[in-house]
Amino acid sequence: MAAIVVVGAQWGDEGKGKATDILGCQVDYVVKPNGGNNAGHTVVVGGEKYELKLLPAGVLSENAVPVLGNGVVINLEALFDEIDGLEARGANASRLRISANAHVVAPYHQVLDRVQERFLGKRAIGTTGRGIGPTYADKVSRVGIRVQDIFDESILRQKVTSALDVKNQILVKMYNRKAIDPEQIVDYFLSYADRLRPMVIEAELELNRALDEGKHVLMEGGQATMLDVDHGTYPFVTSSNPTSGGACVGSGIGPTRITSSLGIIKAYTTRVGAGPFPTELFDKWGEFLQTTGGEVGVNTGRKRRCGWYDSVVARYASRVNGFTDLFVTKLDVLTGIGEIPICVAYDVDGTRFDEMPTSQSDFHHAEPIYETMPAWDEDITGCRTFEELPQRAQDYLNRLEELSGCRISYVGVGPGRDQTIVINDVMES
């Protein structure tokens, strides 16, 4: 049996969907343990491009059972819109299963998310406005609505009414918005009950039994390490724990059952939304990476901020996740650019930091210390082994491995599923 965690090693958008899609062909279950429809994946299968927002990338696997774990917050309208969209293109989403303990996004969560961001003005976090943060806040405050509540109308009504007692006071008295009718929210959830019911399972039990039976389970984290609410660039983070430890919490699979922790990391760095980003570029190279790399958010359509590879972030992510392997994506984007800078440390007011500064203020003021390596001019999109790569590309990867503190086991040289170099297969480790 194998329990593998796939985690973003930067600020998201590293290509986790591609990694999950490749490994998903070899596993029995693919679990999304955290996030909501704010954490999308782009997957290319057979020349077809799929943009997944809430569903696990494993939904496109012919064999794996895709599961939304207990740590996910689910917008039911978005869920079924996405399922309908996939099935209209011939994909099969009938195997999808959902944890009964997962929380659901209510319309009032989305309203609160948007009005709170507007109220913050220049101090806004840069959320997607999809209600993810307020849903997690209700979960922690113990006033959230879970999937299982939708099948008990009495409980559902009690919980919705209780939640809106306070939220309507905030909407009306603080934000000058209209109060929300609890019955409208109850009716909204009940309208999905019949279609939802066949998908709901006791996911924690089924996943652990699968491992007991020698089956393989893959957990694909949404978001990424530097957006983790505890370990990321707080407060410019998401509202969950998209790290290896969070994958255990959000799936019900214990840490002793994890066999591999695979970090997904771009050959450069991107970020969406507000917050510090030491290697961010504001010149022609930032524009080059954005354009050549197609750096536009799957969910938001926002252009991603772009910068050079940050090995300080990579070392930090390797440490807090316990990475066993790295999957470097989009190496082909760097072809032909002359020289490639790599951030090896930070300078903060004259002091060198080889590791992540403890102080958020120090990180905000960090200036990257670079070393450079020569790029390659050859087209690498057809390479399928490490040895087929140009020597300069091999040298670049070897240096990244040395600086990042973790072996590189996969390299993406293009968007297609087959455009991947496998150096060490985690399924065989």
Image: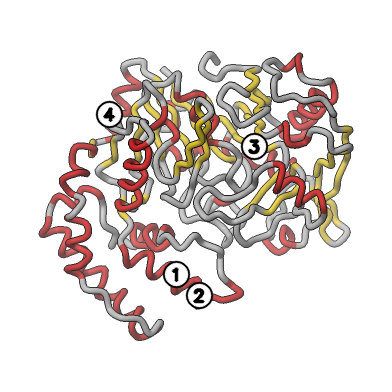
| Up/down of 163 relative to 391, above or below | below
Residue 187 is drawn in which quadrant?
bottom left
Q: State yes or no: discs 1 and 2 in contact (Cβ < 8 Å).
A: yes
What residue is shown at x 22% (from left), y 60% (from top)?
188
- Measured in 3D between alpha carbons, the distance from the residue under mark 3 to the one under mark 1, in whole angstroms, is 31 Å
Q: Amino acid at mark 2?
A: Arg
Can residue 231 be spotted in the picture?
A: no
- Measured in 3D between alpha carbons, the distance from the residue under mark 2 to the one under mark 3, in whole angstroms, is 32 Å
Nearest the camera: 95 or 379? 379
Say which residue label 1 marks. Answer: 114
Residue 127 drawn at (x, y percent): 51, 61
Residue 359 drawn at (x, y percent): 69, 60
Q: State yes or no: discs 4 and 2 in contact (Cβ < 8 Å).
A: no
Nearest the camera: 185 or 8? 185
Q: Amino acid at mark 4?
A: Glu
What residue is shown at x 38% (from left), y 85% (from top)?
176
Say which residue label 4 marks. Answer: 206
Say which residue label 3 marks. Answer: 265
Characterize the local packing of mark 1: few (<14), some (14-19) or many (20 or more) Cα atoms within 10 angstroms: some
Q: Amino acid at mark 1?
A: Arg
Which of pointers 1 and 4 indicates the residue nearer the eye? 1
- Measured in 3D between alpha carbons, the distance from the residue under mark 1 to the one under mark 2, in whole angstroms, is 6 Å
What residue is shown at x 53% (from left), y 53% (from top)?
230
